[in-house]
Image: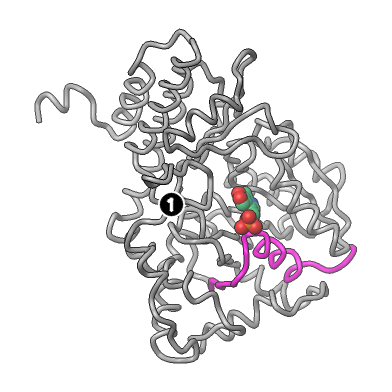
Amino acid sequence: MDRFEPNLRIPGPTALPPTVREAGARQMINHRGPEFAAMLARITEGMKPYFGTTGDVAVLSCAGTGGLEAAVVNTLSPRDRVLGVSIGSFGDRFAKIASVYGADVVKLDVAWGQAADPVAVREAIERQGPFRAALLTHNETSTGVMNPIPELAAAIREVNADTLILVDSVSALGAVPFAMDEWGIDLVVTGSQKAWMAAPGLAMVAASDRGWAAMETARMPRFYLDLRRHRDSHAEGQTPWTPALAVLYQVDEGLRLMQAEGADGVFARHEACAAAARAGLAALGFELFADPRFASRTVTCVRIPEGVDWKSVNAGVRRRGVVLAGGQGKLTGKVFRLGHLGSVTVEEILGAIGALESVLIEHGRDVEPGSAVGTAQAAALESLGVGRRAAATA
Ligand SMILES: Cc1ncc(COP(=O)(O)O)c(C=O)c1O
């Protein structure tokens, strides 16, 4: 492993492209000076199309969890009734933050592996509402499930037009299309170490007019994470506190690379990588943990079958330079996850599938060498619209 760069296939932090790494090593600048103001504006403006908003974006120096905490403490008051829709461990975390700060949280716990059902959400609100806010997870990294956010938002609005809809998109935004203004979402959180191809250290938060208005009356305590301070300071080209400057350099460069590729190209690449991961893992005999209708486009989670000594398989894969993620919480030892977000390429996914294939053969499994890699490659090509015939006539 020491001789080569690992193929880091965990769902964040993601591997950094060379120019992003170099950006992080740049000399410090005055964070109250014009160069910083220009960079901050490039970042906030550059991210707006990915959020799907024309509203303000705040850049906080903290982990994604800090962004979730900001979502809660800026918009809510103690004893506010909140619907915590949870489809996995990050949904649980979001709900937990709200209850720690004194919200009256009603959990809607969905079986892990499933997405939230808009009808069930509507019924929960009819039965137990009204709610001041609903907490949703866009991409549940622990289970590899992507929630149907526009449908869920529409179901919530149908019953409670004024409910604030707060979305954790830490592990999806930037990798898949999102349209917060169009879908009527009030606040969205993302993190630098996921689709944005940068190191951990920044959470980006966008809010709707209704979201910003809610901050004027919300009474939960906040200081460092006060989003209004961030918005007002950003208007002056600054951040309220000393920012994680090196990570801003990286996000700025990551966004430049994403702009060069084009958002559609970024989304198509993620889709192709997801298709390759799912097909390759299925060909190796791993069952998708997620309901396939809602399988994530940034992380694939599969069950570890009976008879597979995962510790030993994972050690073999690591020796080949591929780093996979294990299960989280109650899924520990039951699943593993293969991340495909950020700077990921189809070739990296094929490499990971190939490593797994070799190790399983080593372990005596009945796998034809190259078969899973071939299946994965075909799925990626199909996803990209590059069939065999197209290649033959090209
Ligand atoms: C969906 C989701 N929400 C929140 C978080 C928390 O982010 P952080 O670990 O940066 O606090 C993560 C991190 O993996 C995540 O995947």
**Which residue corresponds to the image point at 67% horizontal and 26% vertical from the top-left?**
334
287 above or below 257?
Answer: above
Q: In this view, does 161 lie to the left or right of 20?
A: right
Identify the residue at the far front of this view: 2
Q: Quadrant of residue 241?
A: bottom right
**Which residue corresponds to the image point at 75% horizontal and 34% vertical from the top-left?**
330
Q: In this view, does 298 lie to the left or right of 118?
A: left
Residue denoted by label 1: 15
Q: Quadrant of residue 180?
A: bottom right
Residue 89: x and y in percent read 71, 43
Q: In which quarter of the image is the C terminus?
A: top left
Q: Which colour scheme is used?
A: one colour
Residue 284: x and y in percent read 46, 18
Magenta-colored span: 56-79
Q: In which quarter of the image is the N terminus?
A: top left
Q: Describe the element under mark 1 as helix, strand or loop.
A: loop
Q: Is residue 162 visible?
A: yes
235, 244: nearer the viewer: 244
Circle 1 packing at 10 Å, graded few (<14), some (14-19), many (20+), is many
Identify the residue at the far bottom of this view: 33
Q: Is residue 167 visible?
A: no
Q: In this view, does 140 lie to the left or right of 369?
A: right
Q: Which amino acid does label 1 sit on?
A: Ala
Magenta region includes residue 77: yes
227 above or below 154?
Answer: below
273, 267: nearer the viewer: 273
Task: Determine if the C-beta at disc 1 is less than 8 A from ligand 1.
Answer: no
Identify the residue at the far top of this view: 366
Identify the residue at the far left of this view: 393
**Which residue corresponds to the image point at 44% horizontal and 30% vertical from the top-left?**
277
332, 270: nearer the viewer: 332
